[in-house]
Amino acid sequence: MIHFRNPSSSIGRTSCDTLRNVSATSNVSAVSQSGWIVDTGACWLRQPRIAAMVEDTMLKFDGERYHLVAWSIMPNHVHALVETMEGSPLPQVIHSWKSYTAQMANHIIGRSGTFWQREYFDRFIRDDNHYANAVNYIEENPVKAGLVSKREDWRWSSAWEGRAGRVKGSADTHVGE
């Protein structure tokens, strides 16, 4: 399980703040659930342009370096279940995502400095039940946070109903629009 947490987050009880305790996973067969939080606890990912850029970045090498099984981009953190491929270890994949998206998000926002929290923790996915629970946890996260009433309504998720029948990565909102 990979876990990125902002221990200094002191925000109250808003839909953004209910997302402070994030967890995530990694396993022997290279299936990994990853969670990462914006360093300041800010809700930069609430901006569609930034959320689209993060999603497009995660989907860019899907099928080449890893298989992106499930994801959910929340207002201040991201969850992803990833099956890594040979030559693309999880730390390298996460570093690539976080490095690029931090640089691009800071540019979009007009700021500099740390964007994502650096730390993470990982653990193995034990079995098929654990795998199914991880997918469910990721896709239900926006519902549990009170952002939508059903998982299919969250635009920045693998569960989004607008994604049905589409090829992954064919987001309808792109950076620059």
Image (spheres, rainbow, N blue to C red):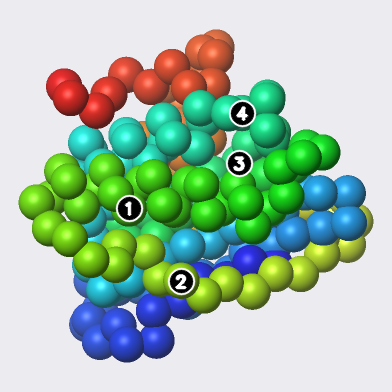
Q: Amino acid at mark 2?
A: Arg
Q: Secondary structure at mark 4?
A: loop
Of discs 2 and 4, which sits in the foreground?
Answer: 2
Q: Residues within 10 Å of mark 1 (few under 14, many from 20)?
A: many
Check residue 118 in the rendering and tell me which mark sits there, or answer none.
Answer: 2
Q: Position of residue 135 (x, y in %)?
A: 66, 48
- Residue 2 in percent (x, y) is at 63, 67
Q: Is residue 132 left or right of residue 82?
A: right
Measuring 61% from the left and 28% from the top, which residue is drawn there? 62
Q: Quadrant of residue 18?
A: bottom left
* Mark with earlier residue (1, 4): 4
Left or right placement of residue 165 versus residue 52 in this view: right
Marks 3 and 2, how far apart at CA? 22 Å
Q: In this image, 36 relative to 39: left or right?
A: right
Q: CA distance from mark 2 to mark 1?
A: 11 Å
Tell me, for residue 70, which label it has, or none: 3
Residue that label 4 marks:
62
User: Which callout, 2 or 4, points at the residue further toward the start of the chain?
Assistant: 4
Dot 1 lies on which element?
helix
The kind of residue tagged 3 is Ala
Marks 1/4 in contact by CB < 8 Å: the verdict is: no
Q: Earlier in the sequence, mark 3 or mark 1?
A: 3
The answer to whether residue 146 is above or below residue 156 is below
Q: Nearer the viewer, residue 124 or 144?
A: 124
Mark 1 vs mark 4: in front: 1
